[in-house]
Image (cartoon, rainbow, N blue to C red):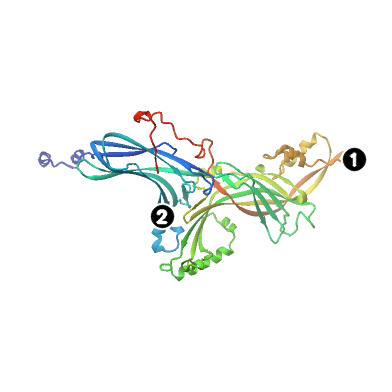
Amino acid sequence: MFNDLSQLLGVASGRNVSQRRSKPVAAAVTASIDLESSDLVTLFDTAELSAGALFSATFLMAAREPHTNVKSVSVDFLQHTVIQPELVPTCRACSEQSTGAVVPIMHWDLLSAPRSFKRGKYTLPFSCHIPGNIPATSSLGVRGATRIHYEVLATVKYTTAGGIAKSCSVRKPIGIKRVLPVSAAPKLEHRSFEPSATVIDSMISNTAFAGRRSPVRMYIRNVTGKDGQSTSGAGKKQNRRWSVRNIDCHLYEEVRNRSMLCPEHDGEKARRKLKKQTEQRRNASVYDVLKSSKPLVRSFFEEEMADESTEENSNTETVVTEMLYRVASTVVEPRDITARFLENNDIEAFFKIDFSEQLGKTTYCTDVDHLNVSVRHKVIMEVTLVEEEISYERLPYKASQLREQELREAATPGIKSREARYDIDDEEARMTQPKPVVDSNGYVMRVCADKTGQMQKLKTVFRQALSDTPQEDNLPWEQDVPPCYNTAVTSGGAPPVYITA
């Protein structure tokens, strides 16, 4: 009886209430953004030399009422920067003011004055030139908590038929990547191992692409064993030499953020802690990060030359927070190393570092220098050397045995024939390949190398800019052309007029 009375009076049960809920009223104005350019904008060259890129899109608006008064239509190209709290150790009370920013890159006013729109759909195209000095879309840190991303925000302010002021907005994320150039001249890195005379000279490319291999040419000279005796130079052991076993390569990403020591909120305790960490960093080695695979976070004072003419600058203390973590690792096996012995048993090695498979599965970014945040990349190589005892075998010489001898030498771990190398000119290989010495009896001496059990590791580091892999269909903005408007419906059949920022 109660249920029947409630239904009669219109007081329905919970199930009936949900069935009788009113549908949401459709908005008087809806908006969207249709990108004519790619949603991934490519910038070529460094931030100082990049010419930028073209960006074009169309704003779409649909009016659902017979007459809608639109006050303004604005579009903003925004840059969002979020810095994780671990990179801002100073001034905890003001950390919210220094851990994020929204910077407008471009702004469009698509309506010069308020206007009344009838029911229908309207299009307003717009375009701009994106400057080449903005950073690429990035996700920094182990968790990706430090981010730089972009979006296009369109806002419509209008008045309904009932005189109610409303607004609607639409967002469209935009990605930006940077492709760096490769210098024709390779970069030379030199590392000495004092007090010994051992040195490593590496010739590498200044730019590493995420989807390609990086070639390296390395020279290892004056290798000294644990007993202090060298296998080359004066007083060398004539029957000993060192050969390359394998090379461990690690790619590290270094994120730095600069902040200021706040005299109001940071006390003397924080100052003493930063001074201690500054001294520890001064005495630390870059190879300490290899001891642990965990990320290294440290803060220290940055020594700056203060302007004596400005009293405000003389009291400024800049704190740099550095986060160093491993992005990718790979091992170059002996079969991928092309090596040969030079004079005095020095080693010349050729190989390629391949991080492409791991970079495709991890979060990485290109080099960034934006606001107070900078990103750099380092490659640390661990070269494992093994000692070999040299002996000679006297064999009868035949012309057909020369190739067989080279193949046997190529089977030695870490050693390959000069002819078997890639990226080496064949004519150069023939000129530098030593000819066999045949004695009067028609015999030649074949080199045999047996491992002695001695092993050592040499570490070297070099800085390399990490870049996105260029695509064949990506062109610089001055070579790009706007899209064709074959389907554009405008008065007189003319293409739409762009509204530039």
**Residue at x 80%, y 47% (from the top left corner):** 391
Please give left or right for residue 100 compared with residue 250 in the image.
Answer: left
Mark 2, residues whose alpha carbon is within 10 Å: few (<14), some, or many (≥20)? some
Q: Count the numbered circles shown.
A: 2
Measured as percent of width and height from the top left, residue 215 is found at: 63, 44
Quarter assignment of residue 421: top right
Could you tell me which secondary element the residue under label 1 belongs to?
loop
Please give left or right for residue 129 compared with residue 418 in the image.
Answer: left
Q: Earlier in the sequence, mark 1 or mark 2?
A: 2
**Residue at x 43%, y 55% (from the top left corner):** 84
Screen quadrant of the C terminus: top left
Mark 1, residues whose alpha carbon is within 10 Å: few (<14), some, or many (≥20)? few
Measured as percent of width and height from the top left, residue 424 is found at: 69, 40
Quarter assignment of residue 17: top left
- Find the residue positioned furthest to the right: 440
Screen quadrant of the N terminus: top left
Residue that mark 2 sits on: 100
**Residue at x 48%, y 59% (from the top left corner):** 258
Is residue 388 visible from the viewing direction of this image? Answer: no
Q: Nearer the viewer's eye, disc 1 or disc 2?
A: 2
Could you tell me which secondary element the residue under label 2 belongs to?
strand
Label ID, residue 440 = 1
Please give left or right for residue 127 compared with residue 29 in the image.
Answer: right
